[in-house]
Amino acid sequence: MRELEERIRRDGIVEDGNVLKVDGFLNHQMDVELFAAMGREWARLFSREEVNKILTIEASGIGIACIAAQQFGVPVVFAKKSRTKNIAGEVYRTEVPSFTHGGVSTVIVSKRFLGPADRLLLIDDFLANGAALEGLIDLARQAGAAVVGAGIAVEKAFQPGGERIRAKGVRVESLARIRSMEGGRIEFC
Amino acid sequence: MRELEERIRRDGIVEDGNVLKVDGFLNHQMDVELFAAMGREWARLFSREEVNKILTIEASGIGIACIAAQQFGVPVVFAKKSRTKNIAGEVYRTEVPSFTHGGVSTVIVSKRFLGPADRLLLIDDFLANGAALEGLIDLARQAGAAVVGAGIAVEKAFQPGGERIRAKGVRVESLARIRSMEGGRIEFC
């Protein structure tokens, strides 16, 4: 999506270690008009899929998911990073390794909000190693819900997550796919 | 706001210890059409305040804040619960005690996204003891930003947060104010 690519070129900051900072408009300060344009694009791409719910993960996916959900006319469920003990049986639970912070997060969704009748669109801000997205796919599988695809804002196509998830048969629609950031120069696929 | 009160009566669940669960529509599964109605109400209430940014805190404030921001035509900044060490000087930082999880969270905002030119509307899903909202007010004060007020979805008016924050001169507009939940029966102010 040209609008997102141009914004990344203009306001994205490349840091050491293949880190792309887009915190001026995507995941700390958030440009909700840009999010609405992204939501319209996913609504066009997934128009035939009868999406009835959007599933995302806290925290930076939530804003994008909520604004995209308005285009689909569906509710959002966000998977929570669990800080408390939950009674067994109440929640679906999965483990997501964090490449940013190190360690592993336990991520949960209440069983009341995911089930076999759901046709889920997964939404997240970034796809790199794919750990968060694989966690969401695992939660959907536990619930018996169908995953119609994933809408990603920024995919680092030089990292293995996108390829691995597409190889599982999940449709992934990334609005900006970065081929390389060598020398601080961002090239899109 | 009648629509929110009716929804709380219909789908809210009162649990032991004055806990009100609204996770079916507000802070786990999220009804974005309801959020849009809430956003329109805050836009009406704060129409003369020249709000130029919305400040919220992760995670459950983000969805409400993003959809409200569309009504104001402004960006959202969310304060992050810090899990990593940040270089001193890069961020504003405050401490927020958690009554849900116990302990204290360090909450940060990048200095790049808050400053003296900002006229902030604070948004959050709940106001009870007021700890999260006081954290946001402290971040705004450090940045030299003006706080024009706070938009809260659900205020537990029998807990001290709302009174304490109004006593500081901050305008608080809560769309549903709960006077009592005794015996599981929800009464609004």
Image (spheres, coloured by chain):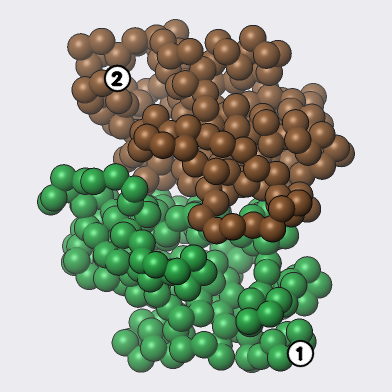
Chain colours: A brown, B green
In the picture of the structure, the residue carrying the numbered disc 2 is A18
Q: Nearer the viewer, mark 1 or mark 2?
A: 1
Q: Residues within 10 Å of mark 2 (few under 14, many from 20)?
A: some
Q: Residues within 10 Å of mark 1 (few under 14, many from 20)?
A: few
Residue A172 in picture, x, y percent from top left: 61, 19
**In the rendered structure, which amino acid carries the disc numbered 1?**
Gly
> Which quadrant holds the C terminus of chain A?
top left
Residue A88 in picture, x, y percent from top left: 71, 53
Mark 2 lies on a secondary structure that is loop
Above or below for A71 versus A7 = below
Q: Residue pushed farthest right? A: A117
Residue at position x 70%, y 13% in the image: A169
Please identify the quarter of the rendering in which residue A42 is found. top right
Residue at position x 48%, y 13% in the image: A160
Q: Nearer the viewer, residue B123 or B84?
A: B84
**Residue B183: numbered disc:** 1
Residue at position x 30%, y 14% in the image: A181
**In the rendered structure, which amino acid carries the disc numbered 2?**
Asn
